[in-house]
Image (cartoon, grey):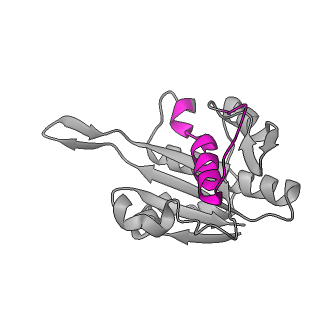
Amino acid sequence: MIFKTNKEMEDYLLQTGSGILNKTVDLPIELEKILKSDFTTNNDCIILQGTPNVHERINLISDGEKCALEFQENSIHPLDFIEHPRSELEYLTLAIECGKRLANRLTNEFKEKKFKIIVSFNETKKENEKIIQIGGSSVSFYQIRDKCKNKILFENKKEYVSEALLEINI
């Protein structure tokens, strides 16, 4: 696994102070079930069955469309699995753990393929006591395809200046 971060993620990783990239974290049971669910492979797209928006039929032509579909459909939001976090950094901790577990599964089950896993995180932001951004995290993945530029998210990080980003390449 190769990890890449933007400046915002580096700052949050320092705040966790626990070497989160190298330790194992317990996950809520429902989140573990999603990560252990089967993969569906259709038209060279790999979709995790436990994610909420699985497509039954995938009729895409370009590799770029396939990457975009995988990225969208393979999206997990740890926010949905914590009722009362002690801190919003718990969302980040769970998202990173999900990313690492996905990396291990994808490496073991699809040895001939390469993937990018993107973990994003942001804290709740307020202006004049009004919430302008709700905190949370997400984890998503897609295959790296030779015929595609694979510029789904991380390479366009200037567009995501308010989000902390971690890219896991496997």
Q: Is residue 96 visible?
A: no
| Residue 54 drawn at (x, y percent) | 67, 33
Q: Is residue 51 visible?
A: yes
| Residue 106 drawn at (x, y percent) | 79, 55
Rendered image quadrant of residue 129: top left
Rendered image quadrant of residue 42: top right
Q: Nearer the viewer, residue 88 or 125?
A: 125
Vertical comparison of 112 with 130: above or below: below
For the C terminus, the image quarter is: bottom right
Q: Magenta stretch?
A: 54-80
Q: Nearer the viewer, residue 137 or 24?
A: 137
Vertical comparison of 9 with 131: above or below: below
| Residue 88 drawn at (x, y percent) | 43, 43
Residue 69 located within the stretch drawn in magenta? yes
Relative placement, left or right, of 19 versus 56 is: left
Identify the residue at image location x=80%, y=52%: 105
Q: Nearer the viewer, residue 4 or 157?
A: 157
For the N terminus, the image quarter is: bottom right
Residue furthest to the front: 61
Relative placement, left or right, of 131 versus 88 is: left
Identify the residue at image location x=87%, y=54%: 109
Q: Nearer the viewer, residue 7 or 170?
A: 170
Vertical comparison of 44 with 19: above or below: above
Q: How many marks?
A: 0
Residue 40 located within the stretch drawn in magenta? no
| Residue 25 drawn at (x, y percent) | 67, 49
Relative placement, left or right, of 78 versus 112 is: left
Relative placement, left or right, of 97 versus 87 is: right
Identify the residue at image location x=70%, y=71%: 146
